[in-house]
Image: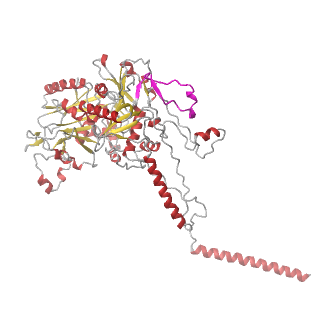
Amino acid sequence: MEVASLPAALELVAGGGAGLSPEKRAVLGASLLLLQRDYRFERVWFWGCIQGVRGAYYIAEGLGPDRAAPRSRLYSLNCVEWSFLPPATEEMVAQAEQLKGRFQGDPSFEYEHIEINAEDAERLFEDGKEPTIKEEARLVATIEQIDRAVGIIPRGAFLKTPLGSVHENRNFEGLSLMEAKKLSSYFHFTEPFNLKNKTLLEKADLDPSTDFLDSLEHDIPQGSWTVQLEKGDTVVVLRSLLWLGLMFYHVPMTKQYGYIYFGTGEKNFDLPFML
Amino acid sequence: MMVKMEKGETPLPNVMETAFYFEQAGIGLSKDESYHIFLALKKLVSVQPIQTCRFWGKILGLEMNYIIAEVQYHEGEEEEETEEEEVIEEGGKRRGDVEDEDEETEKEDEPPKSTYKPPPVIPKEENGTGANKYVYFVCNEPGKPWVKLPPVTPAQIVCARKIKKFFTGRLDAPVVSFPPFPGNEANYLRAQIARISAGTHISPIGFYQFAEEEGDEEEEGGGGRDTYEENPDFQPLSVVEMVDSLSTWVHHVQNILKQGRCVWLNPFQKSEEEEEDEEEEKEEEPDELQQEIGPPLLTPLSEDEGIQNIPAWTAQPSTNLIPQYAVAILQSNRWPGAYAFASGRKFDNIYFGWGHKYSPENHSPALPPPVQAEYPSGPEITETRDPTLEEELAFKAAKEEALAAAEEEDDEEDVEDDEEEDDD
């Protein structure tokens, strides 16, 4: 969520019980602005907080002129000093997917005993290294997975120009209450998978400038999002059940929206049993 | 936070004060919501005869969430819920009548009766003791009416340990699971609340002490003490000490045994009165159950087992920048969402989460039990292969040969006998 609207936004997502202490809010308000100035990001989003066993990671994302480009991610242990995270590679994501258990809270912690395929094992052993993965890499991979899987925006908030770049829609006035209750009004803010599988009839109804992403309607398994109206129907809060701790809020008929993650950074593999 | 009755007249907890301390760690609801809950608790206290009341926490659900209040009634003012039991009894009687009629008409062609005896039902604990020490009220949103949750039975706790389901937000929703949960969502919610309370309600050491009573250790069953009282001589430890070592915190809720109760009960035991008379008789039951022992009340957290290499609790001060006014915060790693704070003489526990225990392994549901053997197998029932035609003919030929051989012997014997007779 945006830096400027952080206090108000935190109030709106506080229904989940997780939030930031006044100290952290004060620190973030200052340090995120400094990040924006120092690294010349156009937008800085406070992504959220991953709880480790011994400490927590605070994550921020910086966006450039094309909002759909890969984002720069930074992490901090105390919200004062931020370090860049390396961009996520497929290999990192694949390795991190096999790791189970909590984050430790120490970025240099090394995980061992990852099970990898025989081919990968041969490849790695040729290099002479043992299969270990650092917590930093796991952090990167987890953030990438969460963004890809459950990072969402309301429909119409972003526009795609004919040249391919994506930026905010200045005419977006917010979803109406009826639209806000439907899952089809929210999109995954990542490369679309299902868009090209739609039939031509469906594609004809789409507006290529706003409907260039996958909607939440066809997420597997069905019911992996809870939609709740809070504060007397003035805020719609979506919570992901696949990544417990991801909360998206939107105030209908206004431009306020955003998502934040407060959790342990573990995927909820038991979801089909729990529904 | 426990409010002493001497201080003020009201059992209403100071929700805003507790929320302030938790906010120092970033835990808690928005101020608006906390205040709404404050007012809702005020209404609850004015309606029900309540001695102590506490905001237990919030459990998130799919359609709606639950706001939970933990309450203790004044002694003697509790309404006993006998409605549910009466309904079950009537249903049982009706079924019994129908069965009798069927038996009378089909006396001759009865199928064999099953010799299956279900394991004995372990009775739930009395209201006011063990897992049912507190009464819980829930509402979906502050402002909606408070609904009382039914007391929890051991069977429900045992089953709740095996399943993992999201709460929908409707108390009457069925819980579809395997093993089948004995109850609806209200019972499942109550069971999870009992488990969370037993696992994560902690207090600084020395705040509670055991009431001094004589003859405490001679209680039946050797069970631990289950009552405690506030210690008037409590000296609070500094925040640094509270955070550094886990032995400065203790559990003040009784641990729930595997059986589903806090105090172990042998289901095969006869009632207490009979036991006193027949103390010398040995119990010759086929299944001798071992008495289950759990950690006694007021055990420090350092005895808590971690999960794999993760300690059971994470302790942190709320701020490193201003240590003089920091608050000690504990987060549970076994029940993510359970928090506790301590600052001077004040402490409290709270829960914000989905209501499930943490397990690093994926949840694997219980497998269905193996198919029961209907009868013991033996040579009489075991099927053998039918003999083939050749085998039958060969057997027949062999039999005829044997018969012919036997006749010849008899003939020879007769002839010999005749010859002998002739000789005479």
Q: Which residue lies at the image location 47% right of the left edge and 27% below the top edge?
A: B228
Residue A52 vs residue B67, the one in the foreground:
B67
For residue B56, which quarter of the picture? Answer: top left
Residue B4 relative to residue A143: left or right: right
For residue B205, which quarter of the picture? Answer: top left
Residue A160 vs residue B363, the one in the foreground:
B363
Residue A124 relative to residue A249: left or right: right
Magenta run includes residue B95: no
Q: Residue furthest right?
A: B424
**Is residue A137 visible to us here?**
no
Residue B283 relative to residue A245: left or right: right
Instruction: Work out whether A118 lies above or below B108.
Output: above
Magenta residues span: B202-230
Residue B252 relative to residue B69: left or right: right
**Is residue A22 visible to us here?**
yes
Q: Residue B181's x, y, as percent?
A: 41, 48
Residue B318 vs residue B42, the one in the foreground:
B42
For residue A27, which quarter of the picture? Answer: top left
Q: Residue B93's x, y, as percent?
A: 49, 55
Instruction: Work out whether B240 lies above or below A84.
Output: above
Q: Residue furthest top?
A: B324
Q: Residue B23's x, y, as percent?
A: 28, 27
